[in-house]
Amino acid sequence: MPTNAKSKKDVSVLERMVLAVERVRDRLLRASGALEAAHVPYAVIGGNAVAAWVATVDVSAARNTQDVDLLLDRGTFQTAKTALEQAAFVYRHARGVDLFLDGPNATARDAIHVVFSGEKVRPEYPLPAPDLDETERLPGGLTVLRCDSLVRMKLTSFRLKDQVHILDLIRVGLVKEEALKTLPDPLASRLRQLLEDPEARSFF
């Protein structure tokens, strides 16, 4: 393959990688801006909230994510729905999940996923989602779930990606052994498992 042809292919792949990150960022900013304009309380949760907290310590350790997850109050959901639809998002309720697709032809991968404060995401989860008074506004204006509350959410669901996110927070020093004293079982046991994991002190 000629060198110039290979170079064009490589640039195209890099551009697609950058575009994927920019689309998530744009989706997050449009959604948060629409909710703030409508005076709807919200918090960014999930991978974007983890990345935001990690970036406050070490920007090079922040992990990209395709998910945009928001915490809302069910009592303000209709106002939030109107605000997000005016920002070109399309509401769907599928398999028990409330989604706002990024356009009529988007898939669930290109969507905002809603979690309701004070409610269990799944019946089997040990704790409900945090309340909206457990938030913090970070420099730049993004409102995210407080770090300790975010960790509690991640320990509650404890999927593989949740464990990776908690490890990210441990590695930059945002989660320490002191947190064990504030957590009920089984969350404390789950955190202890991660704190004792050799990967908790190394980057991959």
Image: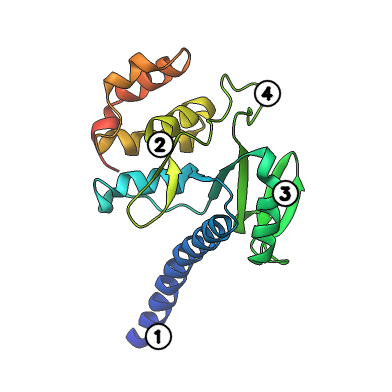
Q: Secondary structure at mark 3?
A: helix
**Mark 2, residues whose alpha carbon is within 10 Å: few (<14), some, or many (≥20)?**
many
**Mark 4, residues whose alpha carbon is within 10 Å: few (<14), some, or many (≥20)?**
few
Q: Would you say residue 107 is visible in this rendering?
A: no
On screen, residue 117 versus residue 155, left or right, reads: right
Q: Would you say residue 172 is visible in this rendering?
A: yes
Question: Disc 3 or disc 2, which is closer to the eye?
Answer: 3
Q: Give amino acid for label 3.
A: Gln
Question: Which label is found at residue 78?
Answer: 3
Q: Give amino acid for label 2.
A: Arg
Tell me which residue sits at (59%, 49%) in the image: 40
Q: Give amino acid for label 4.
A: Pro
Q: Is 181 situated above or below 77?
A: above
Tell me which residue sits at (46%, 61%) in the image: 25
> Foreground: 164 or 133?
133
Q: Secondary structure at mark 4?
A: loop
Query: Earlier along the polypeptide chain: callout 3 or callout 1?
Result: 1
Q: CA distance from mark 3 to mark 1?
A: 52 Å
Disc 4 target residue: 123
**Viewport quadrant of the N terminus:** bottom left
Q: Secondary structure at mark 2?
A: loop
Q: Is 55 situated above or below 37?
A: above
User: Can you give x and y, in whole percent of width and height, for residue 196 in the image?
Assistant: 29, 21
> Foreground: 185 or 80?
80
Q: CA distance from mark 3 to mark 2?
A: 25 Å
Q: Are marks 1 and 4 in contact (CB under 8 Å)?
A: no
Q: Give amino acid for label 1.
A: Ala
Q: CA distance from mark 4 to mark 3?
A: 24 Å
Disc 2 target residue: 146
Q: CA distance from mark 2 to mark 1?
A: 48 Å
Q: Which image quadrant for residue 181?
A: top left
Disc 1 target residue: 5
